[in-house]
């Protein structure tokens, strides 16, 4: 399986997962032009995409869908609550939507997909675990806390993209209005660096060997701070970065590293 984040921030999120001739986007929150440019690095055309897995309907996760389905035919897969919202936001794309029950499993080409509920400030949101006979990958961002449902889906994955959105001190002392700070810090907001470190420790203890920190806030975090915080949490649990696990941060507006698992 080949994984690459194409963008990861509040300005846009999109991740490519490939297995053989099966190519899947997790979210499409950047423009069609940017997606096409990124796919060109892999000699992939948007017409070759097996589908788009949508986590939730916030604009930074769906901004490119309208143009993608206008010019390229592919299914847009989302849990029922998210798909219903998308029909209102992007009515032109409603014929492309494929609904499923959150928590269900299905197959896209050569990849098995399991969805799982996540806590975020939308009526419904999900993360995804993607499996092949050789490897497993979990994607979980935009979560206010780590739930048993998330752990049940994520533990044992070979690689994980997880949220490390903010440093709590930076957020509390920053310029955001009080209501926005409360939203981000809530159990349906975004995951802090500290909580990301705890999640990373649990994942490594269950066998994860590659972790990418994603959806970092520009205003309330830095890649160095997120990496150091998670690294320190792993050290406390006896985990050595570079030995027991590879740890990276996803670039906000550019393609990240290409991972093969």
Image (cartoon, rainbow, N blue to C red):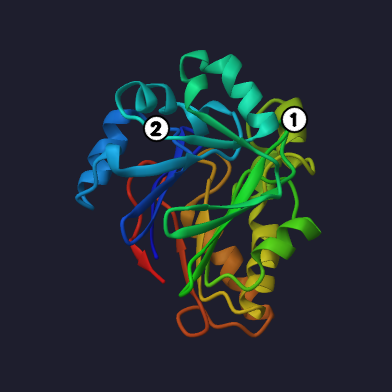
Q: Residues within 10 Å of mark 2 (few under 14, many from 20)?
A: many
Residue identifier under label 1: 123
Query: Dot 2: what SS?
Result: loop
* Viewer-side label of 2, 1: 1
Of the numbered discs 2 and 1, the one sitting upstream in the chain is 2
Q: Quadrant of the N terminus?
A: bottom left
**Dot 2 and dot 1 residues touching (CB under 8 Å):** no
Where in the figure is residue 130, as x and y percent of width and height? 53, 59
Residue 32's disc is none
Count of numbered marks = 2
Residue identifier under label 2: 30
Q: Quadrant of residue 45?
A: top left
Report the front residue among 229 and 142: 142
Where in the figure is residue 188, as x and y percent of width and height? 76, 40
Query: Dot 1: what SS?
Result: loop
Where in the figure is residue 29, as x and y percent of width and height? 45, 33
Q: Is residue 233 visible?
A: no
18 above or below 132? above
Report the front residue among 107 and 130: 107
Report the front residue among 11 and 81: 81
66 above or below 221? above
Give the residue displayed 68% in from the left and 50% down from the top: 104
Q: Quadrant of the C terminus?
A: bottom left
35 on left or right of 125: left
Where in the figure is residue 57, as x and y percent of width and height? 59, 29
Q: Quadrant of residue 156?
A: bottom right
């Amino acid at each position: 399986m080949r994984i690459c984040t194409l963008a990861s921030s509040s300005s846009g999120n999109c991740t490519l997962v490939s297995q053989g001739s099966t190519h899947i986007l997790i979210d499409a929150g950047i423009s069609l032009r940017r997606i096409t440019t990124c796919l060109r690095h892999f000699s992939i055309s948007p017409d070759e995409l097996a589908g788009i897995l949508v986590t939730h309907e916030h604009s930074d996760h769906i901004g490119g869908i309208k143009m993608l389905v206008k010019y390229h035919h592919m299914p847009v897969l989302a849990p029922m609550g998210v798909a219903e919202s998308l029909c209102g936001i992007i009515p032109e794309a409603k014929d492309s939507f494929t609904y499923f029950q959150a928590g269900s499993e299905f197959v896209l080409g050569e990849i098995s997909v399991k969805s799982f509920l996540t806590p975020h400030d939308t009526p419904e949101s999900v993360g995804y675990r993607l499996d092949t006979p050789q490897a497993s990958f979990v994607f979980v961002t935009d979560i206010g806390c780590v739930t048993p449902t998330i752990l049940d889906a994520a533990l044992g994955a070979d690689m994980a993209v997880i949220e490390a959105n903010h440093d709590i001190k930076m957020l509390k002392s920053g310029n955001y209005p009080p209501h926005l700070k409360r939203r981000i810090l809530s159990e349906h907001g975004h995951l802090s660096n500290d909580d990301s470190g705890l999640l990373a420790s649990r994942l490594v203890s269950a066998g994860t060997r590659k972790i990418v920190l994603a959806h970092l806030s520009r205003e309330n975090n830095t890649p160095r701070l997120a990496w150091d915080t998670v690294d320190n949490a792993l050290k406390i649990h006896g985990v050595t970065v570079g030995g027991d696990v590879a740890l990276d941060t996803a670039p906000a507006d550019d393609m990240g590293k290409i991972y093969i698992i």
